Amino acid sequence: MTAIMFDTHEFIKELKGAGFSEEQAEIITKLQKSAIAATLEQAKHDYDLDDLATKRDLKELESGLKRDIKELELKQDAKLAETKSELIRWIVSVGLLQTALISALLLKLSALG
């Protein structure tokens, strides 16, 4: 998770400029840092921030899915081409068989008549 930047030196400087003593400014800064850390921890717990997806996560997922879809399309195209080839072989085979049967029948009829 990304840390929040907290410039303690600037914070102490601002407090001292507003009239706080060095000790008061350091105590307030320490308490502020603790409050920020507790708030972030509570937000992490409440919203389970470790499971949130980043834009990078989504981009990686998108490219993975696109790659998977492309692979599936290529496999489908290959399967379709294979099926088409088998169908053509069957049609040609049936056509040749039909031609042979008709020729045999015509030869038998011409021999009888």
Image: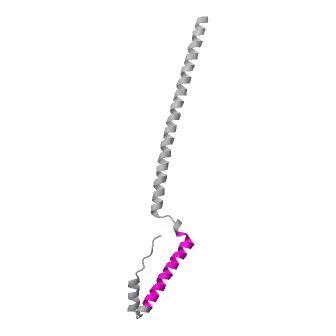
Image quadrant where one finds the C terminus: top right
Give the camera-side residue of 27 and 106. Answer: 27
Up/down of 88 relative to 110, above or below: below
Q: Is residue 113 something one can see in this rendering?
A: no
Q: Which residues are magenta?
A: 24-49
Between 113 and 43, which is closer to the camera in this rendering? 43
Q: What is the chief secondary structure element of the magenta stretch? A: helix
Q: Is residue 40 magenta?
A: yes
Give the side of residue 23 with respect to residue 100, left or right.
left
Residue 16 location (% of width, % of height): 39, 91
Q: Which residue reaches farthest right?
A: 112
Q: How is the image coloured?
A: one colour
Q: Residue extending furthest front?
A: 23
Instruction: Estimate the x, y position of residue 50 in percent, counting from the top left.
Output: 52, 67
Q: Residue at x 49, y 82 (%)?
A: 34
Q: How many marks?
A: 0
Q: Position of residue 109 (x, y in %)?
A: 60, 9
Q: Residue at x 51, y 37 (%)?
A: 80
Relative to residue 109, is residue 96 depicted above or below?
Answer: below
Quadrant in which residue 47 is drawn: bottom right
From this view, report whether residue 112 is shown above or below residue 35: above
- Where residue 39 appears, as percent x and y from the top left, is 52, 78
Q: Is residue 93 visible?
A: yes
Q: Is residue 98 magenta?
A: no
Q: Residue at x 49, y 48 (%)?
A: 69
